[in-house]
Amino acid sequence: MIDRLGPLAPGQLTAAQRAAAQAIIDGPRGAVYGPFVPLLRSPELMESAQRMGEYLRYRSAIGTRLSEIAILVTAREWDQQVEWAIHAPIAERSGIEPGIVRAIAERRKSPAMLVDEALVYDFCVELHRSKRVSDATYANALALFGEKGVVDLMGINGYYTFLAMVMNAAQTPAPASTAAPLPE
């Protein structure tokens, strides 16, 4: 697999690309990596995406632990190795049991999930596979997370789907990771 939109040399960057890259470097990510490498070709899109992602990843209404489950489900549904390599270790550091991470990699729901984890899993799987969320799952999510939390959960799924599409089309290689790659 050839990286179609790999890293650009600093001398190749336009002023807009340099500014967009510097904004990411100066933020919580600290470097341009993963989806931001191909997105750098469109600095305005990259800046908009990174602002949305910064909110969804670091400050969503459902919190980091549950956001990481949504990210892992999205990575699994899109067979996205970069997202998986980055977020599987983060999920475990956020309190998600390794067995739960393995179950998501195997496209199955772990019986060890806490109630809120299982609800996020169900919501995300329904949204990805059915392109909808059942009334029962939606009502449960609304009761647990409120409207803002439900909207943020939808946003996490959409944002990481966008990144997965970019990286799958660009054939972005996965970084070294402590996480095993997603099985075929």
Image (tube, rainbow, N blue to C red):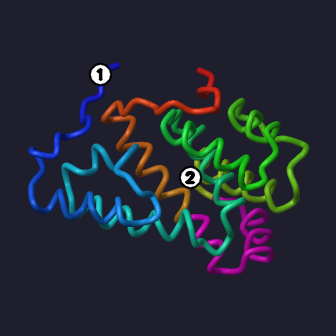
Which structural element holds mark 1?
Answer: loop
Which amino acid lies under the numbered mark 2 shown in the image of this protein?
A: Lys
Dot 2: within a 10 Å radius of its alpha carbon, few (fewer than 14), some, or many (20 or more) residues? Answer: few
Q: Which mark is residue 131?
A: 2
Q: Residue at x 35, y 30 (%)?
A: 171
Does residue 104 lie above or below 27 as drawn?
A: above
Lateral position of residue 112 relative to residue 83, left or right: right
- Magenta-drawn segment: 133-154
Crowding at mark 1 (Cα within 10 Å: few <14, some 14-19, many 20+):
few
Pick whichever, 103 or 6, lies toward us: 6
| Three-letter code, disc 1 | Ile
**Secondary element at tag 2:** loop
Q: Earlier in the sequence, mark 2 or mark 1?
A: 1
Give the residue at mark 1.
2
Separation of residues labelled 2 and 1 (CA atoms): 31 Å
Give coordinates of residue 46: x percent, y percent. 29, 59
Report x, y in % for residue 182. Answer: 61, 28
Quadrant, the N terminus: top left
Provide the major secondary structure of the magenta segment: helix
Q: Quadrant of the C terminus?
A: top right
Residue drawn at (19%, 49%), measured in percent from left and top? 41
**Left or right: where 25 falls relative to 145:** left
Q: Residue sitting at 59 percent across and 51 percent down?
A: 71
